[in-house]
Amino acid sequence: MANTLDMRTIFREDIPLIDVRAPVEFDAGAFSQASNLPILDDMQREQVGICYSASGPESATSLGHDLVSGEDRDIKVAAWLAFLREHPDALLYCFRGGQRSRIACEWLKAEGYDVPRIEGGYKALRRCLLSTIENLPPLIIVAGKTGSGKTEFLQQFGQAIDLEGIANHRGSAFGRHISAQPTQLNFENELSIHFLKLAQHPSVFIEDEGRMIGKVHLPPPLQEKMQTAPIALLEDSIAMRADRIYQEYIELQWREYEAHFAGRAAEEFSRYLIEAVDAIRKRLGNTAHSEVRGSVLAALKHQEQVGSLEGHREWITLLLADYYDPMYDYQLEKKSSRVKVTGSRELVTDWLLSHTESFA
């Protein structure tokens, strides 16, 4: 059985994992290096669970063996064997490190494969990761107005974590991608793994974020740590920021919609933009919302008639000047005492590289 003391190594070294839980369990929360090769499918798991509640563990185990037998068992064992041939160092686990993983390992041993199973299963692995979030390293926050390119800026540093990348969301009303966000459990698991892999650094750089990134929320210990962390503030002109937003949220996003939706791209792209504008109606106020919404509709009409995306630049600049910038100025004022450097990308880069260890 895999030693619990080695759990951090499992994640640091991306050791392959066989997760024999049912798909419904895996979909709710798993790990990036794990492959779901279940011993019980969702329906079988439900049947065994009902039997366990009604008749106890022995009857449930007996039913499990009856359900997974013959050709079904052969297919599942063959899938594990195929995975192990590609990943001979793999480990195996179920939810608590109990019956399912034990039986799977017994069946594999009969085929000549002695696979270590993880003591405590998924629950123990997740506890290990959550302990990382409870003991975070010193943080340095990279802040800046909307469109400052904070995410891209942080990519140059080996000790940075891309919160928005892990959340699969750009962090604003317009920030959703075509692909779905991870579940809250998966977000926390992946975030913890990133922190674990950076444990050797004296501090970690992350982007300034609110409590929520789309539909997932930052773990409370991280939120608390961010509220006292020093801030490095990126500055850029509104013209440069508007152009950056246009490139990412309009040009890049439109290409993704074309590739994904084909003939429905224009319809889905319009829905995405209008829903985003309507989501901030209360914060904009009725008058400003009507103005911005009208500008978005005009840009979409221009796009349809002329085939050009350029009309979107107008509402982007309008929204920055009248909404995002004033809101950011208000929020920044409340944490201005923590701002340690303000300036260009070059200036902030130099400051971060020279002041990293002083905050450890």
Image (tube, helix red, strand yellow):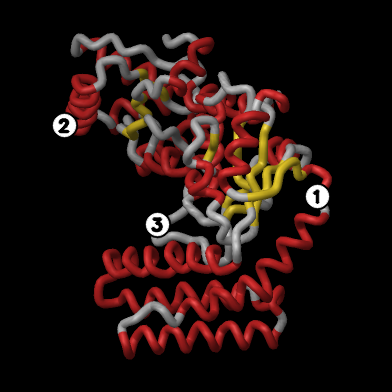
- The amino acid on which the numbered mark 3 sits, given as a three-letter code, is Ser
Mark 3, residues whose alpha carbon is within 10 Å: few (<14), some, or many (≥20)?
A: few
Q: Is residue 85 left or right of residue 23?
A: left
Above or below, 339 relative to 251: above
Q: Secondary structure at mark 1?
A: helix
| Residue density around tag 1, few if under 14, some if 14–19, many if 20 or more, within 10 Å | few
The residue at the point 55 percent across, 88 percent down is: 294
Name the residue carrying label 2.
71
Q: How much space separates mark 3 and mark 1, taking CA atoms?
A: 36 Å
Disc 2 versus disc 3: distance between alpha carbons? Answer: 36 Å
Q: Amino acid at mark 2?
A: Glu
Q: Is residue 117 left or right of residue 123?
A: left
**Position above or below: 133 against 101:** below
Q: Of the residues under marks 3 and 1, which one precedes in the sequence? A: 3
Q: Which residue type does callout 1 highlight?
A: Ser
Q: Which mark is residue 179?
A: 3
In terms of secondary structure, where does tag 2 sit? helix
Decide which of tag 2 and tag 3 comes sooner along the chain. 2
Q: Disc 1 designates what residue?
A: 336
Q: Where is residue 15 drawn, in percent x and y?
A: 37, 21
Q: Residue at x 59, y 25 (%)?
A: 127
- Residue depicted at x 50% and y 82%: 296
Q: Which residue is at the front of the view, 38 or 190?
A: 190
Spatial CA distance of label 1 from label 2 is 66 Å
x%, y% of residue 252? 37, 63
Label 3 near label 2: C-beta < 8 Å?
Answer: no
The quarter of the picture where residue 276 lies is bottom right
Classify the position of the N terminus by image quarter.
top left
> Is residue 231 shown left or right of residue 89?
right
